[in-house]
Every structure is written in C-alpha cells, then in structure tokens.
Image (cartoon, rainbow, N blue to C red):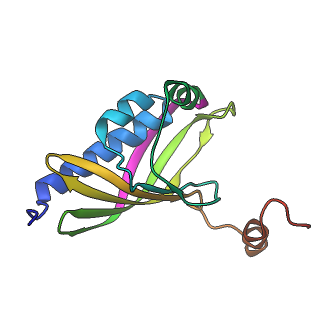
Amino acid sequence: MTDAITEEQLAELIRTMDEAADAYIRGDIRHYLTLFDHPADYTLMPPYGGETTRGFEYTEESLAETSRFFASGEARLDVVESYVSGALAVLVAVERQHGEVGGTPDQDWSLRVTLVFRRAGDRWQLVHRHADPLVRPIPWELFSRIARGAESDD
C-alpha cells in the first residue's frame, strides 16, 4: 500500500511545478525534464487543441527544437486548488507566463492547466496535463469558430 502524500510533499510538488513551468517557457527543456518523470501512460491535451497524445518520447533533435521554440520567458504557477488521493495529486492552476514562443515577440502565454501527478518512490511522475489559453473570457462567436475547427467555412 502506498503511503499517503503529506502536506510537505504537496508543497514541494507545487514549488517544483512552478520551477518546471518557468524552465519550459525559457526554453530550458533539459532542466524541465530533470524535475519530473513522464511515464509510458502519460497523456497530454495540448493548449492548441488536437488529439490527446499518449506517452512521452524525445530525441536530442526534438529537445533542441523545443528549446529553440521557447525563449526569454518567465512563469509563475498560481494554484487554484489541489487534491490528493493515495499516490495521486491533482493541481488546478494558472501558469501565468510570458515569453517569445515560436518566433513571436514577447507576449502573454498564460494557460489554465490541470495536472495529475503520481508519486513513485521519492519522485513525481507527471501522468496527465490538460492546458488551454482561455485565462480570459472570449466572445461566444469566437468560441463557436474555435469549436468548429481551423478548416471550417466562415
């Protein structure tokens, strides 16, 4: 039976996730990868939409490409709520961040995120991430166009 996650472990998880968000938006992907394990059953629902991906595989080339894609950013994790059950912890948060992403000038890239972690020994595994950019409300008409998809006729 797995020991219950303590308040201290949860607080450390939140601090580590704050550090991870900051590392990622700065393009320091190697540091990000030292902070959490991504197991074979990891799922990602990316902020730009599309299918849910499973697993987490990377090559030296993909690490370098991702590191170049993100630059000069800063992030802070604002936790809205946290939940713990057995070896699982869930964070509902906003990653308040800005940076140069994909060659765009520095701008706000804040994301609403739901993160599911599993405790494995003395390490945390990030087992699920769901992110979206809807930190601020958008008009219904824009939401409707987004829901129809990029290829829809307007």
Q: Position of residue 82 (x, y in %)?
A: 29, 65
Q: Position of residue 16 (x, y in %)?
A: 28, 43
Q: Residue at x 26, y 45 (%)?
A: 15
Judge from the rendering whether residue 21 lies leftward or rightward of residue 49; answer left or right: left
Judge from the rendering whether residue 55 lies leftward or rightward of residue 141; answer left or right: left
Q: Position of residue 103 (x, y in %)?
A: 68, 30
Quarter holding the N terminus is bottom left
The relative height of residue 39 versus residue 62 in the rendered view (above or below) is below
Which sits in the foreground, 72 or 128?
128
Asked which quadrant contains residue 43, the reply is: bottom left
The relative height of residue 41 versus residue 152 in the rendered view (above or below) is above
Q: Is residue 77 magenta?
A: yes
Image: magenta residue range: 69-79
Quarter holding the C terminus is bottom right
Q: Residue at x 65, y 59 (%)?
A: 50
Which sits in the foreground, 107 or 17?
17
Q: Is residue 140 magenta?
A: no
What secondary structure predominates along the stretch shown in magenta?
A: strand
Q: Residue at x 47, y 40 (%)?
A: 57
Judge from the rendering whether residue 81 lies leftward or rightward of residue 58; answer left or right: left
Which sits in the foreground, 122 or 74?
122
Q: Farthest residue to the front: give it.
A: 40
Q: Position of residue 106 (x, y in %)?
A: 62, 34
